[in-house]
Image (cartoon, rainbow, N blue to C red):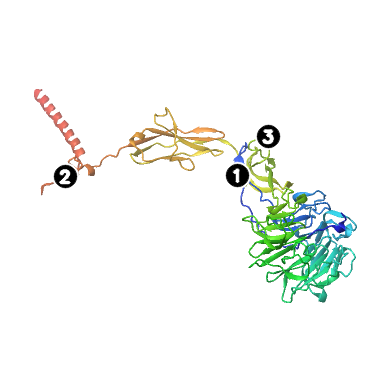
Amino acid sequence: MPKANRTFLTTAVVSAMILVGTASATPGPDRGPTVGGTTVMVPEPAGVTFRQVFAGGTFNLALGDNGNTYAWGFNDSGQLGDNSQVYQRVPVRVILPEAVTFTSIAAGGRHALALGDNGKAYSWGDNWYGQLGLADYEGAIWIGTAQEVSLPTDVSLVRIAAGFDHSLGLEENGQVYAWGHNYYGQLGDGSTKDRPFPVSVSIPNGQAVTDISGGLRHSLALGADGRVWAWGYNEYGQLGDGSGMNQTEPVEVALPEDVSIDRISAAGGHFSLALSDDGRIWAWGLNDSGQLGVGSTITQRAPVEVVAPEGVAFTDISAGYDFSLALSDDGRVWAWGNNGLGQLGDGSGTDQFCPVEVAVPEGVSLSAIYAGHYHALALADIGRAYSWGLNELGLLGDGSGVNQSTPVPVAAEVLVTSIAFDGVAGQAPMDPNSTAPANNGDGTWSVVTPAHAAGPVDVEVSWTFNGVEQPPVIHPDGFTYYPVSAPTVTDPESHTVLVGESAEFTVSVTGEPAPAVTWESSADRGGSWHTVTGGISEDGLSVTIGSVGLADSGTWYRAIATNSQGVATSSPAELTVTEPVASEDEEGEDGTGEGGATDSPIPGLTDPLAETGLDGSSLLWAVGLASIALAGGLIAAVRARRG
């Protein structure tokens, strides 16, 4: 097909900034023996979330929060920027100029534009009409990698817009520049001559411009005063001046006097959209599929108001080839026009002449919308992209190639390919001959550590995004190797306790890796041992035997420490259980246990025991000794008499 006859669409870009938190997750466990063999779980890389996306005529662009730019879809003119002409069904990385990060993007029919963080503009893709604006590549049909646009000296752009085969740029001072195809006057420089380099566009009365938008063969500019200017092809009234005549210089769109515009979109095939500051949408131009949203298919050469659902105020707009998208202030997405390929996203496949709600998946909140040729692209507030409509050669980026009549997520597959410890890959948990990490299905991946000398090492996670290798994620000192040693365990002390009390046996252990401690008991003085299951502390170093009885007396307890280097068993400790001994206060003097009196019952008579200062037991011993002594004296006297 001749390039002059190609159809397309682009849309004005609206950035949706995503705040991305820094993950605090680290490998776990974070230490293990030098011999290796520790199964470590590592958090999955966060993947890529988008902060800006853009739907072009035949392809799509996205800015990742990681500083990379991605593209997918058709690539016949190098529009994906990966220096090839291979079509891609999922996002792939654009090759960026050295030390440059893109801050804004725009997609045309088959060419792309970007602004760098160095203040320069870049372009790649189709260059049939000079729409790339490259002095060093004048006459080149296509360029597969981003090149710097040849802007006039001291000119720095703050906005860019891509038409089908022409380009627009906006300076901070409100000056507009244009380059590329100009057969219909779409460059606005007063001629119909193609321009391979940027030329200035003069807005009447020196009006400063705040926004620009490139269409199929026409262009729009938004003035600082809320008025809209248009130039280029006008057969269907897409310039909105009521004349139907092509214009090589900007003319004012005939908006109602009380209307002030906030946003513009000329990316439609032959129609235009504008959003006023009160949330209403205005449309003009070709209306053969109901793309103007006015309830009919009558073409309009001047702006008319889109029929909005009751109570709906709009906040964003985007014009497709022959359909339109809008975002309302309550977060809902609306569409109208041609629906033959599902581009309205309502699941019906039926053309709609007034806005209908897009069937956004439950729980998904879309924050920005972009209409492509026959497909749509949207950005969710979590940084995920969704798409619907035509899916020829991967336009939707979901990898399927199948048209979708409701939104589906753009592919964002993360695959961890290796987890290395100080540069040495870990082994697969179930296959020692493989280094492929295991996906645990909970956001973590597992490997088994290799052997390594003692000390901390970095853990490096290699991964791909949609099959494309990404910069590795590094966990500095994420794992520490320690030297191994056999376990040791101290001996617990024996305890004697009363019936009903508790006894606690405690040990300490050494060894690397840290030993696991279990407890055993024996009721037959070591003849047989049984595992103790209750009363064990969290660290295993103590066991408490509660509410003991006489039957527990004589039980032995021992601790067993185990690690990968061996087993250590303590000597047993014995538990002795005794009954309480009754005190004198409890039994009383009469031995009845009823607490006899300690004072004499007869007044004036003193207690003889109290006089001696001896208790009952001591007195009995004294009496006994006295009796023995007396008996000895009597025997001696008898013998003396006999002698």
Q: Is residue 147 left or right of residue 523?
A: right
Q: Is residue 502 left or right of residue 341?
A: left
Identify the mark at residue 611; answer none if there is no mark: 2
- For badge 3, the amino acid type reads Asn
**What is the quadrant of residue 247 in the picture?**
bottom right
Disc 2 or 3, which lies upstream in sequence? 3
Image position of 47 with respect to 211: above or below: above
- Could you classify mark 1 by the number of other residues whose Cα lies within 10 Å: few (under 14), some (14-19), or many (20 or more)? some
Image position of 105 with respect to 46: above or below: below
Mark 2 to mark 1 CA distance (whole Å): 78 Å
Q: Which residue is mark 3?
A: 433
Along the line of sight, which residue is nearer the eye, 323 or 179?
323
Mark 1 to mark 3 CA distance (whole Å): 24 Å
Is residue 307 visible from the viewing direction of this image? yes
Expressed as whole percent of the image width and height from the top left, the position of residue 151 reads: 84, 64
Image position of 130 with respect to 548: above or below: below
Mark 2 to mark 3 CA distance (whole Å): 95 Å
- For badge 2, the amino acid type reads Glu
Disc 1 or 3, which lies upstream in sequence? 1
**Contact, mark 2 vs mark 3 (Cβ under 8 Å):** no
Q: Which residue is mark 1?
A: 30
Q: Secondary structure at mark 3?
A: loop
- Could you classify mark 3 by the number of other residues whose Cα lies within 10 Å: few (under 14), some (14-19), or many (20 or more)? few
- For badge 1, the amino acid type reads Asp
Expressed as whole percent of the image width and height from the top left, the position of residue 248 reads: 86, 69
